[in-house]
Amino acid sequence: MKLKDLESELFRLEHFERPKVALEQYVTGPHIAGRMLHTIHMSFGELQNRLVADLGCGCGTFCIGAAILGAGMCVGFDLDRDALETCDQNLRHLEVDRVNLVCQDLTTGCVARWHKTFDTVIMNPPFGTKHNKGMDMLFLKTALDMANTSVYSLHKTATRKHIQKMAADWKVNMKVLAELRYDLPASYKFHRKNSVDIEVDFVRFSFAN
């Protein structure tokens, strides 16, 4: 599938009706999500026929996109039942199958049943800058525990050195695939601008052979 066709499909998704600030719920737009998924698929071949997890799946952008690109099975994890309901509606609207949804808090670590279960884990974790400081690293540690091949994630560019240090401590490979600008639309009352561009890294984590 061409990138523009994937983006077109992702544009059809419904998003958070009432985003919850405590969960840092923001939409990963079709432009960024499409390019991330297309890169994972075309450059690394880590979607087609793979078992894929989408952590903090929200309304399902990554898990639905991965399924469209031929993933063998996708599992979307989120603790917010409202988001999972919207994700389920998107699955039915786009007539996408091979996606299961699990309501689970990922900040408490990887539960035994999911340890090293997934070939590929994809996520846009909470950055933890206004609320829940360090949440991005909790998500990343859980993702690494759940993956057996690779983790793809978005992180604020300003935190790159810290993440590099943690990756070295955890003995995982880290490669910044692209520097992106995340267009963050005004979603909450405390937002004073219509949108803000945040510099983010699209990162691939993998395990040493």
Image (cartoon, rainbow, N blue to C red):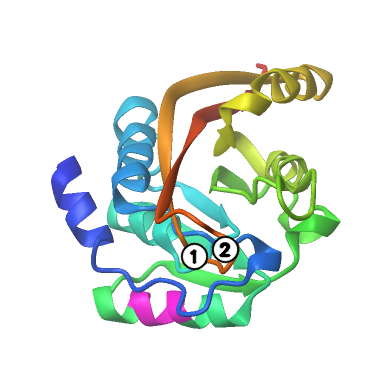
Tell me if label 2 and label 1 are in contact, CB under 8 Å.
yes
Which residue lies at the image location 54% right of the left edge and 55% below the top edge? Answer: 54
Magenta region, residue range: 86-91
> Circle 2 is placed at which residue position?
25
Q: Residue furthest front?
A: 192
Tell which of 151 and 79 is nearer to you: 79
Tell which of 67 and 201 is nearer to you: 201
Residue type (three-letter) at the residue carrying disc 2:
Gln
Residue 30 in the image: state x and y as whole percent: 31, 52
Which residue lies at the image location 79% right of the left edge and 24% below the top edge? Answer: 166
Residue 97 in the image: state x and y as whole percent: 35, 71
Q: Is residue 90 magenta?
A: yes
Q: Main secondary structure of the magenta part?
A: helix
Residue type (three-letter) at the residue carrying disc 1:
Ser
> Circle 1 is placed at which residue position?
187
**Helix, strand or loop at disc 2?**
loop
